[in-house]
Image (cartoon, helix red, strand yellow):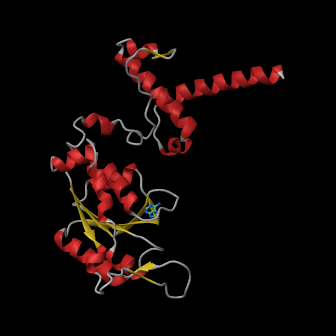
């Protein structure tokens, strides 16, 4: 899978190659490739200007259409099967299911907007989709593009080494991931739950599922609205509900 990034800050993407991370290894093993195109290289003037004032007035600058359009066309020519994305806070929210769809694509071209955004005509005619990584405004699309590369890369078969890791991820199961522990068994007075030391795989599976449910209820109850739940899940949640009612009941009679 190739990622081609259109940016005025190509040097930012060297961050993907720092340390011994999974993305770096995926590039080295050629599961993925990351190329950058500097939009400034397509500016026609001596000063390599890529922005201009907005028609209609207002503060900030807009990315000019001509250099950006040429840069996108060059990327599309090299990767005609690729899906072209614009990173922008106005886009659809990026999540694990969008990442899974992108992982099936024949390549991804990502346009990193800067300033107040890009000329609308380029967005309309040369971009397939717009993605946002969350409801906040970054100074440009570069960090968002790196988030997309990181997330999609680990879904490409082979990149993780252990395929189970991606399968059990938070969101892939529809629930948040259960708590993890490693040695020592006792750390600053806090012990690893006994069941995880029991060797009883059925009990461990059940404990993990229930721990995932509790985490999801507490942190992301919205996920449970769309998630198919098993009969055991419902039974467990009813029991929780009963326990909570009993506790509340005790306290309301006490006060
Ligand atoms: N560019 C600026 N903010 C962004 C965001 N939240 N997501 C994607 N691209 C952006």
- Residue located 55% across and 36% down the image: 217
User: Against 171, is 71 above or below?
Assistant: below
Q: Which part of the image, by quadrant, shows the N terminus?
A: bottom left
User: Against 114, is 235 above or below?
Assistant: above
Q: Which part of the image, by quadrant, shows the C terminus?
A: top right
User: Against 27, is 219 above or below?
Assistant: above
User: Against 237, is 92 above or below?
Assistant: below
- Residue located 49% across and 84% down the image: 54
The quarter of the rendering in which ligand 1 is drawn is bottom left
Farthest right residue in view: 255
- Would you identify the image quadrant in which residue 69 lies? bottom left
**Is 42 left or right of 63, judged from the image as shown?**
left
Residue 100 visible within the image: no
Measuring from the top left, give residue 145's x and y in whole percent: 35, 59
The tally of labels here is 0
- Residue located 15% across and 50% down the image: 30
Measuring from the top left, give residue 117's x and y in whole percent: 45, 74
């Amino acid at each position: 899978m190739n990622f081609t990034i259109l940016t005025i800050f190509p040097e930012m993407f060297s961050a993907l190659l720092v340390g011994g991370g999974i993305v770096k290894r995926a590039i080295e093993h050629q599961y993925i490739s990351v190329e950058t195109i500097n939009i400034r290289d397509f500016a026609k003037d001596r000063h390599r200007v890529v922005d201009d004032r907005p028609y209609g007035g207002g503060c900030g600058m807009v990315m000019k259409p001509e250099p950006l359009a040429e840069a996108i066309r060059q990327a599309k020519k090299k990767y005609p099967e690729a899906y072209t994305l614009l990173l922008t806070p106005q886009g659809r929210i990026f999540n694990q299911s969008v990442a899974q769809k992108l992982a099936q694509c024949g390549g991804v071209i990502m346009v990193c907007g800067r300033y107040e955004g890009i000329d609308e005509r380029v967005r309309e005619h040369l971009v397939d989709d717009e993605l946002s990584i969350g409801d906040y405004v970054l100074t440009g699309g570069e960090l968002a593009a790196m988030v997309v590369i990181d997330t999609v890369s680990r879904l490409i078969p082979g990149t993780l080494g252990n395929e189970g890791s991606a399968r059990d991820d938070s969101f892939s199961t529809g629930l948040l991931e259960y708590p993890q522990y490693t040695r020592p068994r006792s750390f600053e007075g806090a012990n690893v739950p006994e069941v995880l030391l029991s060797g009883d795989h059925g009990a461990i599976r059940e404990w993990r599922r229930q721990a995932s449910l509790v985490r999801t209820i507490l942190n992301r109850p919205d996920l449970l609205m769309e998630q198919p739940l098993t009969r055991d899940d419902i039974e467990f949640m009813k029991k929780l509900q009963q326990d909570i009612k009993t506790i509340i009941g005790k306290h309301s009679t006490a006060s």
